[in-house]
Amino acid sequence: MKFGVKLIDINNIEQFTEIVATVSRLCSKGSCGKTCIIKLNKDSICFVLPEFASNQLLPDNPGRVSFWMKIDALLLFDFYIFEGKSAEKSTIMIEILPENLYHVLKSSPNVKNIKLKLANKQSICLSIEIEYCGISMKSKSRTVSHDIPVKIISSSFLAIKDFQEPNLTNSSLSIQLPCLKTLKHMIERMKAMGDFINIEATKKGDLTLKIQTDCVSVSCFFKNLPVQVQNNECNSYSLRLSIKRMSEFINGLHIKPDKIICNFVKNKYAHFLVIHNENMVLHYLISSILD
């Protein structure tokens, strides 16, 4: 069992730090504590919030959230080494506090390169070596090591739905949301007005965000957004979500995504798909709340 990566390109270092920051932020707001599962394969790394399975997000569990993030390891990392226990057991799963990893990465200015690997130092850990550039042209670089404790998860859990990539085919309608900056502005203003937000989308690409209470009713409209319809039963679909959970999702994104798509799974949950730089995909699910 072997895993190791090396980051040299400064753009890759910054992007990986932003990804870990996003995972750390989303985990801290999740319903399962601050830990997450990292699923390692020969060509990808997945971050999964425990109890991911969408059957945990039914209306009788209102406001629950979970996510799955997949990174194309061969595109993001300058060097990537992976070896499973055997051909049959070609996946490694570890449990980690992503906050610990982010704390190490964010405190790394003037970085020359970063190495990460699984190591056994009395116990299994994620060993990180960061080489810093010298302060001046004549000074030597220096290397700082960090060990973050992790827990190996048995491969027998791989078949559990919690650890499988979510299925997008069960959605009724998919619509591309406005840019992240606009979303943040609207959600933060509406959050002060109520606890729940109604999201409605039509086949024509019209999107409505609405807050309605006994004292106020506020709506925000977007027209002609890219849309894809999987189910022709209705002209429009809507979900009622916790605006607190929606805000945590939007504000938890430390990346600048290429696009965010909202998939409506009727009466169950909103399935947000975040695409970033062609090497990262994030699935984020928020369960709906019945009126």
Image (cartoon, rainbow, N blue to C red):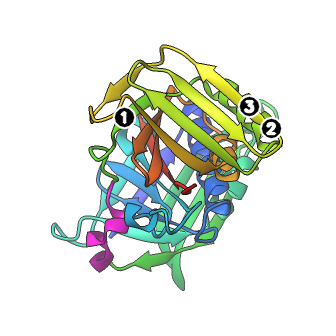
Q: Residue 279 versus residue 141: which sits nearer the camera?
A: 279
- Considering only order in the chain, which callout, 3 or 1, is on the residue closer to the N terminus? 1
Label 1, label 3: how far apart the Cα atoms are: 24 Å
Q: Which residue is mark 3?
A: 218
Specify the amino acid type for callout 3. Val
Q: CA distance from mark 2 to mark 1?
A: 29 Å
Helix, strand or loop at disc 1?
A: strand
Quarter of the image with the C terminus in it: bottom right
Left or right for 218, reference 93: right
Q: Is residue 107 magenta?
A: no
- Write down the region rendered in magenta: 155-165
Amino acid identity at mark 1: Leu
Location of residue 235 with respect to 33 vertically, above or below: above
- Label 1 neighbour load within 10 Å: few <14, some 14-19, many 20+: many
Neighbor class of circle 3 (other Cα within 10 Å; few <14, some 14-19, many 20+) is few
Compared to 235, does 33 lie above or below? Answer: below
Q: Residues within 10 Å of mark 2 (few under 14, many from 20)?
A: few
Q: Which residue is mark 1?
A: 173
Label 2: which secondary element: loop
Which three-letter amino acid code belongs to the residue tagged 2?
Val
Instruction: Name, please, the residue furthest toward the left.
Output: 88
User: Earlier along the polypeptide chain: callout 2 or callout 1?
Assistant: 1
Placement of 133 over or under 148, stated as above or below: above
Would you say the residues marked 3 and 2 are in contact, meaning their CB atoms lie under 8 Å apart? yes
Secondary structure type for disc 3: strand
Q: Is residue 256 visible?
A: no
